[in-house]
Amino acid sequence: MAEQVGLTRRGLLRAGLAAGVSSLVLTAAACAPAPAIDSLTVAGGEPGGFYLEFATLLAQSFERHGVARHASAIETGGSMDNLDRIAARAATVGISLADAAADRSAGPAPSSAAGSRLVALGRVYENYVHCLVRKDSGLAGVADLAGRAVGVGAAGAGTSLTAHRLLEAAGVTVREESLGLNQGLAALRGHSIDALFWSGGVPTAAVAATAKDVGLSLIDLSPLIGPTRARFGEYYERVLVPAGAYEGIPSTWTVGAANLLLCREDLPDAAARATVELLLMRASELVPSTSLGVQFLSPETLINTAGVPLHPAAEAAYRAFHG
């Protein structure tokens, strides 16, 4: 019976959302001629990771639906690199972990022209912090990493910020190696590191390939959520990597952090409104084919941007949508 009620509620919700989307489309069509912008770049991440997959799909959607005449995704080092590129106008929009974006947003006001403030267009998906070890390593918990060689993310990646916070909250000192996803997985394969931190969607394609070839385990990071939130803010939550996400790895609890789609405040209002329309109406186009689809954008969570302010035109579009 409970399941029937849930299904009914979801059906009613879908009907309500469809009506809201129709209203938003009419509003956007009346206010923003297409294309909203001539050329647009989406700052992504490393090959084999969700950031670049999502950025590529978003760029394709921007072109397909006339938001921009030309749109492309660019490979980057991750969250902090993306924030730098947005600030320097080397990218129009980009993806970042919420904790890194909130740190940047709370920093000193930019000295350049008005309108350069970092703002959000929406919360686009949940990020899962992976602490990966070889299955035969004998490492079972974060405390076991003490004194070990650990890949903590590349410079410029949000993984690095989150990994340092988790290790600090755990009171564990490791031998840090600044390694991104692909370098880190290679080092894990070659036994030159004992563990690798990586933040991404589930499953991350490069991790899935390595788990199949080498045999990996995930360390449960969820006990660190309380102390990490107490020290660094409420950006972190308990999420489950489901069984079957990676070959040979059982369901494992870990730390989740939101991923935000960000831009400068001077992004034209028409482009911001049109982006919101895509996020609300075309979400199915923005889910990488490898994804289990358990962590992607929904109308209810898009506006939950972890303290990073929404672009004013995006906020207005969400208000129109939600009534």
Image: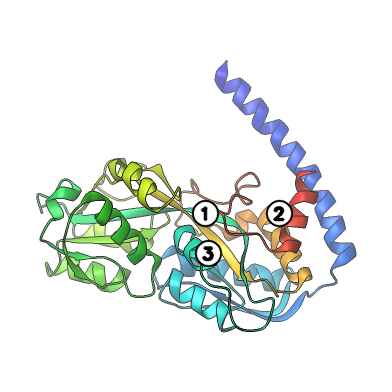
106 to the left or right of 152: right
Kindly identify which numbered label has been placed on residue 153.
Answer: none
68 to the left or right of 306: right
For label 1, the residue is 125
Location of residue 80 in the rendering, given as x and y in whole percent from the top left corner: 44, 72
Location of residue 137 in the rendering, given as x and y in whole percent from the top left corner: 10, 54
Secondary structure beneath dot 3 equals loop
Question: Amino acid under label 2?
Answer: Met
Question: Amino acid under label 1?
Answer: Tyr
Q: Choose between 291 and 179: the one closer to the eye.
A: 179
Quadrant position of residue 211: bottom left
Q: Residues within 10 Å of mark 3 (few under 14, many from 20)?
A: few
Kindly identify which numbered label has been placed on residue 106.
Answer: 3
Report the quarter where the C terminus lies: top right
| Residue located 18% across and 54% down the image | 172
Kindly indicate whether the residue at mark 3 contacts the one at mark 1 (C-beta within 8 angstroms).
no
Way the structure is coloured: rainbow
Count of marks, rendered view: 3
Q: Choose between 75 and 179: the one closer to the eye.
A: 179
Residue 218 visible, this orientation: no
Q: Choose between 312 and 113: the one closer to the eye.
A: 113
The CA distance from mark 3 to mark 2 is: 31 Å
For label 2, the residue is 281
| Residue located 45% across and 69% down the image | 79
Question: Amino acid under label 3?
Answer: Ala
Kindly indicate whether the residue at mark 2 contacts the one at mark 1 (C-beta within 8 angstroms).
no
Using the image, determine if residue 155 lies above or below residue 321.
below
Secondary structure beneath dot 2 equals helix
Using the image, determine if residue 127 lies above or below residue 238.
below
| Label 1 or label 3, whichever comes before in sequence order | 3
